Amino acid sequence: MTHAAPVVTRSEEETAGIAASLASRLPPGAVVLLTGDLGAGKTAFVRGMASGLGIEPEEVSSPTFTLVQEYRGPRATLYHVDLYRVEGGEADDLGLEELASGGGVVAIEWAEKLPRPLPGALRVTIADLGGDRREIRITEDSGADPASYSDR
Ligand code: ADP
Ligand code: MG
């Protein structure tokens, strides 16, 4: 399920395609942690995941004040979480583990703000290589990198 080597995409559509193919293979309760600077393509990736789950990708936006958006699809419910505005520790109270245990697919932008690892999560790291080029790395999150969790 994971890409051993990073993939370089050259358009938003190409990124969405990778995300859609990943999402269509995810088991119920899967958690995808997205990391990357502002404008890297995290929301674009989540839009692609939506389409892979049979959800209208246009429904997925970057809400200003909603931390968790729920999209019901024919195969699974997608929970889109954006922690951009969350202060250290606040992510604790969002019940993210409970969302996953309900059998939906959970995609979390700014996952580095999570106070602790979520068991079994996949990590998607997107880097802007300039222009429309993005490097996408999909790995299993070991939770081993202390710098990637906010209060450890
Ligand atoms: P983030 O959620 O990480 O802040 P967004 O997904 O909102 O980023 O924005 C990514 C921006 O980069 C969009 O304007 C998108 O069209 C553009 N873009 C250009 N090339 C790519 C690519 N290869 N993959 C994803 N997005 C890209
Ligand atoms: Mg975003």
Image (cartoon, helix red, strand yellow):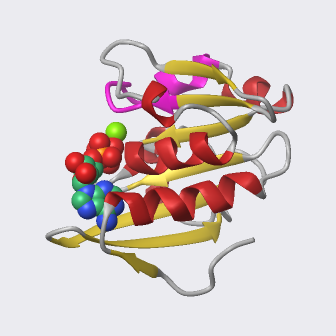
Residue 55 lies, with reference to residue 22, above or below; the image says above
Can residue 38 be seen? no
Q: Is residue 48 left or right of residue 13?
A: right
Q: Is residue 104 above or below residue 24?
A: above
- Residue appearing at x 65%, y 61% in the figure: 21
Magenta span contains residue 91 = yes
Q: Is residue 109 above or below residue 97?
A: below
Which contiguous range is marked in magenta? 81-94
State the image coordinates of residue 138 (x, y, percent, origin top left): 57, 69
Q: Tag count in the figure? A: 0
Work out which quarter of the rendered image holds the N terminus and state it: bottom right
Residue at image x 48%, y 82%? 6
Residue at the image position 34 percent from the left and 53 percent from the top: 41
Relative image position of residue 64 (x, y in whole percent)? 30, 17
Tell me what residue is drawn at x 21 percent, y 68 percent.
132
Camera-side residue of 38 and 118: 38
